[in-house]
Image: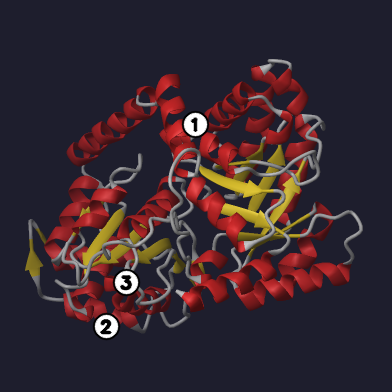
Amino acid sequence: MSPARGSAAGTAAVPMPARLPRHEPSRRAESGAEGEVGRRLGGRSGGRRGRADVVYHRRRMKQPFRIALGSDHGGFELKQQLAAFLAELGHAVEDCGTSSREPVDYPLFAQAVARLVARGEADFGIVVDGAGIGSAMVANKVPGVRAAACTTEALAINAREHNDANVLTLGAGHVDLATAKLIVQVFLSTTCSEERHRRRVQMIRDMDAALAAGGGLGAEDLQRVVARVKELLGRGSAPTPEPVIAPADLAKMIDHTLLKPEATRADIRKLCEEARAYAFYSVCVNPAYVRQAVEELRGSGVKVCCVVGFPLGAQPTEIKALEARRAIREGAREIDMVLNIGALKSGDDEAVYRDIRGVVEACKDGRAVCKVILETALLTEDEKRRGCRLAMKAGADFVKTSTGFSSGGATAEDVALMAAEVAPRRLGVKASGGIRSYADVVRMIRAGATRVGCSASVKIMEEAKAAAGKG
């Protein structure tokens, strides 16, 4: 990948799986951009199938798709243009960044897109960098993703028809806007329907499943990873400069949180106003306030997260699942559940698994994200590891450190341990509890956090802006 178009050398590798504001579909889809691209396609031929067949598939597949869209700085301009184009076609676009032309590392954004596709939160992914090659390599490291770098319509058709590709990567240095639109359109409108192709795609899926089942890190490997992370965090190593995270990108890693029992409706309104102003990823509230938060944030792109089984985790699984389903019906898009801490400490892993799985199933039914709170301050190292493994086994999307209501909150060491433990399934890690400053957030991200829950979010953002100004 060309340095001018690809990632910048020397930038701090800070995980950035965050999503930027959603591009809402346009009602002009049928008569606007789709008609224009259809006319551009008419009469051409390529590969084994003529363009008339492509138009047929496009007309048949009228349902809008959920599309995860990302880029590095080299692909930023083309990504923004494609976002508008896709919305005009009627698709729901989840923008995973980057948010400006400032130099960034493309693997962060390619991975963010790929994870959404792998978790079923997006039907397709599109990533734009300088050449499209590096992002395809990154995306294909995520199990369940079949990414293809395409520079022509014929390649896009082949990627979908023969390989059922679900992530498209484009090189801004190799395709112009008009060509990119054509490639995107045929990619989304072509299906993999022939039995011989589907059989081969199933072979790829089987390989993914085999790797997921047998490709995990052993206990000794995990211990070495954690030890190395601890060393990098400062134990016995020379201090290193703190990376500076762009405030706009940092905001998309924050769950702006208010869970105090004395919180009023006015407090929730203020929380949502702050989330709108700073474009936080979500607000995290108690179940009683989900409906209000959804109304306050309508049209903003800020999601609503609801806690379940909070804060003790001692409710029956059926009650937790009921809480989750109700919150999802009322508009929550993410659920933070507290696992059964007593069962975990008792060694009853089967009960813990069933507890998590009950809520995971509720989330999957409602297409919501499930995070599992371990309450690390109450656990031994072995219990933390087992909790992470059970969350992976149950199909959760994240593991989370703390409720913020126990004897301690997030530590960089716990985040590093959890990140290493869930690495085989690539779960997210949410750090929460006691995170009160920008320096705290940076430490958590360096340790492996991909999301941060905090109530001091506004203060943290102002400190981030000051740090960015100095940088």
Residue that carries the numbered disc 3 in the rendered image:
73
Q: Mark 1 falls on what kind of element?
A: helix
Q: Is residue 309 above or below residue 36?
A: above
User: Is residue 106 visible in the rendered structure shown here?
Assistant: yes
Q: Quadrant of residue 344?
A: top right
Badge 3 vs badge 1, beta-carbon distance below 8 Å: no
Q: First in sequence, mark 3 or 1: give its number.
A: 3
Residue placed at 57% from the left, 26% from the top? 385
Q: First in sequence, mark 1 or 2: give its number.
A: 2
Image quarter hosting the C terminus = bottom left
Image-based side of 328 in relation to 292, left or right: left
Residue lying farthest to the top in this orientation: 347
Residue lying farthest to the right in this orientation: 262
Q: Residues within 10 Å of mark 3 (few under 14, many from 20)?
A: many
Dot 1 amino acid type: Glu
Q: First in sequence, mark 3 or 2: give its number.
A: 2
Residue placed at 79% from the left, 38% from the top? 407
Residue 237 screen position, x and y as percent: 44, 42
Residue 236 screen position, x and y as percent: 47, 38
Q: Is residue 203 above or below residue 171?
A: above
Q: Residues within 10 Å of mark 1 (few under 14, many from 20)?
A: many
Q: Nearer the viewer, residue 7 or 370?
A: 7
Frontmost of labels 3 and 2 is: 3
Image quarter hosting the N terminus = bottom left
Residue that carries the numbered disc 2 in the rendered image:
36
Residue 442 screen position, x and y as percent: 54, 57
User: Is residue 55 visible in the rendered structure shown here?
Assistant: no
Residue 173 screen position, x and y as percent: 17, 73
Residue that carries the numbered disc 1 in the rendered image:
421
